[in-house]
Image: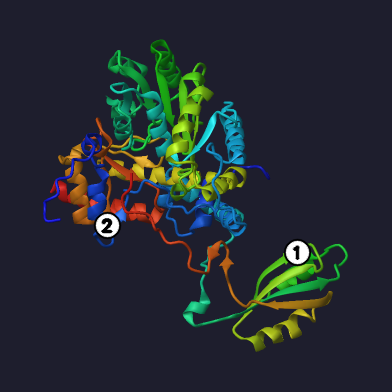
Amino acid sequence: MSQSLSLKPLSKKALEVPFSGIRRFFDIAASMQDVVSLGVGEPDFVTPWSVREAAIYSLERGQTTYTSNYGLLELRREISRYLSKRYKIEYNPEGEILVTVGVSEGLDLAMRVLLNPGDEVLIPEPCYVSYRPCVSLAGGIPVGVETRSDAKFAVTAEQLKAACTERTKAILLGYPSNPTGAVLSKEQIVEIINFARERGLYVISDEIYDRLTYEGIHTCVASVPGAREITILLNGFSKAHAMTGWRIAYACAPEHILKMMMKIHSYTMLCAPITGQIAAVEALKHAEREVEDMVAHYRQRRRLIVDGLNKLGLTCHMPLGAFYAFPSIESTGLTAEQFAERLLLEERVAVVPGTAFGAGGDGHIRCSYATSVDKIELALARMRKFVDKLHK
Amino acid sequence: MPNEVPDEILTILARDARTSFDTIAKMTGKSVQDVEKTVREYEQSGVIKTYYTVIDWEKTGCEKVVAFIDVKVTPARDVGFDAIACRIARFAQVQSVWLVSGGSDLRVVVEAPNLRELATFVAEKLATIDGVTGTTSHFLLKRYKEDGALFFDSEQDQRLVVSP
């Protein structure tokens, strides 16, 4: 026992993947009092009561077992019906839909199913913090494709074409976008799909914010001509139904792809938690009114925060989806990191520096408007003090 | 107009009557002048009846007695239930009057500083109105939700301060 232990090192892959840039701000903010947070990436609403009530009732009835690896058939049928009704896209509940533990799991499964070591995945950036790590952990190489604020952060087929190499295997789209609020128009999606088909690429489309689209109706990537057979569609209940903690989402794909995802899922996850699945059934069946009500709130707050940020001189385009404003802070002369840190320490407002979201994020901050009108106004007032101080 | 989408300004005010014209303007993308004009028009046309505050009086230590009274009425010729309903509605103690379906005709909410005054009001004023044939009083014991506001500790914001 006295002999010193020299353990072998941990996996290189695990060690090499960086921690999220969001962590540092969480640590500082969590240690402070009276912080107004625009840094939260989840709804400020609690899951609608009818959904919670359905879950409680299921526990009372003793529904505490495993489900099919694919997820409850009833839930898959509801998902299939929902996608058919809303986006006119048909997925067979038996074989083409998999219930996952959050879109995060769906994304991980998609990458593991598609990638061989060294395969490249094109990722429009700024993007959600997990995209790059998920590709790396699956053995692939993430290739950031920088989008710009003057294009409202929408990626174009040309930009993807320019980044495409022999090793490119897939394109990972996340629209409406966290952190930019960008959406893709149907025409833009069609061009991307045509390009992907030409090169034999897969498309993974994370559409977790589909319902939070404020002008016009969201176009489901898989629903445009030619997309279905090359697309893995990921969506879930976290945002629209305010169900982040339930961890229930789904993946839809042609059977031969989905079957591989199910295989991995059956070994690593077995199934998504049954209580959450039952809650999700209720969410799809009876919570539409609540969803629309929440979307109406976000739409109004969006205008409020964008107007406020622009008046502060933090230029901000009107985000078309999700619940984030992504203003430029270049007029202040600070970097995004400096801005976010000083704003937090000096005025107790938490935002996330754009650099946490990859290329194109520098010079920007992410401000979530998934918070009450009162808090948004308080945050804007504090930011006014901060910006005025900088200009003195 | 049963299927009209409700005016955004009204839905915001219904949620919080204190929302300023300035904030409403920003939330709806309209000008402050337009918002103010619309609200004034709603007030004048009676679409907006009044603004008030939902108060948990029990917490202030100044409790009031409230009763829900089912009133049976003989409707009068030509005016139906309206004449009696309006007559009842004019009493200051009466908070609400609704014509309802079911076993009784009018549902009346009465508020008084104490039980004695409330009982006196029902016995001497309400029950004696011509056309009122019977009353059944239900006393309020505990409030759980009123006008959309929960009267018990509702969910606090439990989210992490910063999350992806």
On the image, the x and y values in percent for residue B159 come to 38, 54
Three-letter code, disc 1: Leu
On the image, the x and y values in percent for residue B34 come to 47, 45
User: Are tags 1 and 2 found on a single chain?
Assistant: no
On the image, the x and y values in percent for residue A391 come to 15, 46
Quadrant where the N terminus of chain A sits is bottom left
Which secondary structure lies at badge 1? strand
Seen as rendered, the residue at the extreme bottom is: B116
Q: Which chain is mark 2 on?
A: A
Q: Nearer the viewer, residue A104 or A155?
A: A104
What residue lies at 36% left-to-right and 26% top-to-bottom?
Answer: A154
Three-letter code, disc 2: Ala
What residue lies at 43% left-to-right and 28% top-to-bottom?
Answer: A205
Which secondary structure lies at badge 2? helix
In front: mark 1 or mark 2? 2
Whether pointer 1 and pointer 2 mark residues with C-beta atoms closer than 8 Å, the reply is no
State the mark number for residue A30. 2
Q: Which chain is mark 1 on?
A: B
Residue at which label 1 appears? B99
Q: Is residue B7 visible?
A: no
- In the rendered image, which quarter is residue A335 located in? top left
